[in-house]
Amino acid sequence: MRRQSSGLVHPTCPAHSGASAGFPQCEDEPFMSHSAEPDPSPAVVASFKPSRTVVLIGLMGSGKSSVGRKLAHRLALPFRDADSEIEHAAGLSIPEIFATHGEAYFRDGERRVIARLLDEPPHILATGGGAYMDPRTRAAIADKGLSIWLRVDLDELVRRTARRNHRPLLNQGDPRQILANLMEQRYPVYADAKVTVDGGAGDVDEMVDRVLAALIAYSTSADTAPAHSE
């Protein structure tokens, strides 16, 4: 299955210089969504149902939860928020888990919760920013889900995360520098997602439209791609 992304060429693709502006030529390159891509018609949306859980990944502030809730509503699917599920299972908030037990404890619980959620029928799943960094979680998502990276630039992430102070990692220093460091560490790993959709300063509904168009385009391309035999 090919991956889809939003206009950037995958840096590891040897054929990147010749990739088209639409669907990349390189088999390993992410499938990218484009802002110029027409939105699917209401009839197409109404008939579309993903066969796997759609897993939203990205840094804090990328809009995974807000986009996920509206995407789930548009597709008439359940919505799950991994952080909320972790808090429910632990009986503690995310900041309390970090403060009481540390990040390693949180990541272990996060991995187990996401594995459980992936065993449920298809739904929309928003994950925490660090979840996809765990190799076992990435493998589970690749096996049972369809990953979509909501990619947002640094200035927009800083603007969005400044609204709230409930994020433990951003309370450890200068938020802008912390986010820049996280981007450097995580974005190369996030690039493994099957689909990448760029987010900007637009509203949530606009981003949902982009994600939905990319999801349907990816699913269509995967369904129509010729089979390969070894």
Image (cartoon, rainbow, N blue to C red):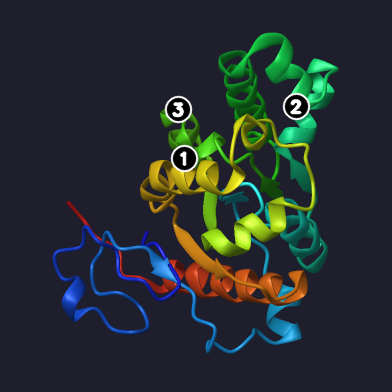
Mark in the foreground, 3 or 2 = 2
Task: Name the quadrant containing residue 228.
Answer: bottom left
> What is the secondary structure assignment of the residue under circle 2?
helix
First in sequence, mark 3 or 1: give its number: 3
Name the N-terminal-most of marks 1 and 2. Answer: 2
* Residue at the left extreme, as displayed: 14
Give the answer, above or below, for where 169 lies relative to 97: below
Mark 3 Cα-neighbour bin, 10 Å: few <14, some 14–19, many ≥20: some
SS class, disc 1: helix
Residue designated by label 2: 94
Lateral position of residue 102 relative to residue 191, left or right: right
Residue, x 73% and y 52% (percent of image)? 162
In terms of depth relative to the viewer, which is nearer, 9 or 209? Answer: 9
Circle number at residue 143: 1
Could you tell me how far apart the alpha carbons at marks 3 and 2 are, in whole angstroms?
Answer: 21 Å
| Residue annotated with mark 3 | 136
Amino acid, disc 2: Ile
Q: Which amino acid type is marked by label 1?
A: Asp
Is disc 3 placed on a helix, strand or loop? Answer: helix
The alpha-carbon separation of the residues under discs 1 and 2 comes to 27 Å
> Which mark is in front, 1 or 2?
2
Q: Tell which tag, 3 or 1, sits nearer the viewer.
A: 3
